């Protein structure tokens, strides 16, 4: 099913379809962003960042949590960002919105105490996508860097995302964290912000 979770009516339609199937695990992964600094981020951009990153999750939580309460079990996983703890100067409203997601999730975990439902955040670092990889490979020659990804990635990491793990994240890294928090194995983990960033937030 598809729908615009930044719109009340569309989000309601999506949640109704989901409830028809039954929902035990909710992963809020909507997170639009644009590059803005303090000079270019107009109030409208701030509102859009909050609506797309925070309120989209709020809409789904409010719709899907009540049946979880009735069953006495559920998992809510909100996808944050390393920008929540290390704000990015070129994504000011996005960073603030992701910080709100982390705060909101902790509040939700406390609200749901004793219900059998846990609420946690997973905050990715820099995750390499196919598009990002192509972008770096295409620009490598201009910089005199290796063009093959195994040799290129360490240069990209050193330049853009230095971290103790020495590599960029993958979709599989994030999926593994989400799958763990969604499982019965994570029943005693609640209200945390699990950073999946290779340690980047700890690197000055």
Image: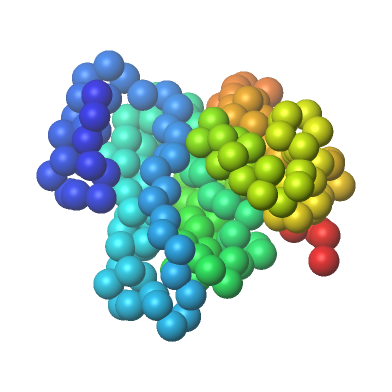
152 or 39: which is nearer to us?
152
The answer to whether residue 52 is above or below residue 48 is above
The image shows residue 60, relative to residue 90, as above or below, that is above
Direction left: furthest residue:
9
Residue 129: x, y in percent? 56, 34
Q: Residue furthest right?
A: 164
Question: What residue is shown at x 60% (from left), y 67% (from top)?
Answer: 87
Query: Which residue is pictured at 59% across the width and 66% down the height?
Result: 88
Can the viewer see residue 186?
no
Q: How is the image coloured?
A: rainbow
Q: In this view, does 39 lie to the left or right of 21?
A: right
Q: Answer with left or right where residue 198 lies relative to residue 34.
A: right
Judge left or right: residue 26 versus residue 116: left
Quarter of the image where the N terminus is located? top left
Quadrant where the C terminus is found in the figure: bottom right
The one of 29 and 181 positioned closer to us in this rendering: 29
Q: Left or right: 189 with respect to 20?
A: right
Return the x and y of residue 77 as percentages of the image width and height.
51, 38
> Where is residue 186, by image quadrant?
top right
Q: Residue at x 50, y 58 (%)?
A: 98
In the image shown, does 191 or 100 lie closer to the viewer? 100
Residue 9 at what x, y percent from top left?
Answer: 13, 44
55 or 19: nearer the viewer: 55
The count of marks equals 0
Residue 150 appears in the picture as rendered? yes
Can you name the residue that lies furthest to the top here? 21
Identity of the residue drawn at 81% across and 59% down: 202
Q: In this view, does 99 lie above or below 169?
A: below
Answer above or below: position of 110 versus 44: above
Q: Determine the residue located farthest toward the bottom in the rendered image.
A: 39
Q: Residue 193's x, y, as percent?
A: 64, 49
């Amino acid at each position: 099913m598809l729908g615009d979770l930044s719109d009340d009516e569309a989000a309601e339609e999506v949640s109704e379809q989901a409830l028809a199937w039954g929902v035990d695990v909710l992963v809020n992964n909507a997170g639009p962003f644009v590059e803005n600094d303090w000079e270019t981020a107009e109030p409208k951009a701030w509102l859009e960042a909050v609506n797309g990153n925070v309120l989209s999750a709020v809409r789904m939580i409010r719709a899907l949590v009540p049946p979880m309460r009735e069953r006495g079990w559920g998992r809510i996983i909100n996808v944050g960002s390393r920008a929540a703890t290390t704000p990015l100067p070129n994504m000011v409203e996005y960073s603030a919105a992701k910080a709100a997601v982390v705060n909101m999730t902790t509040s939700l975990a406390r609200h749901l105490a004793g219900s059998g439902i846990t609420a946690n955040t997973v905050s990715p670092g820099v995750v390499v996508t196919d598009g990002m990889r192509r972008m770096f490979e295409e620009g490598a020659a201009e910089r005199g860097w290796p063009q093959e990804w195994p040799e290129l990635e360490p240069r990209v990491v050193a330049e853009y995302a230095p971290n103790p793990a020495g590599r960029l994240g993958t979709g599989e890294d994030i999926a593994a964290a989400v799958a763990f928090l969604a499982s019965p194995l994570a029943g005693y983990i609640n209200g945390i912000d699990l950073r999946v960033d290779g340690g980047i937030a700890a690197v000055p």
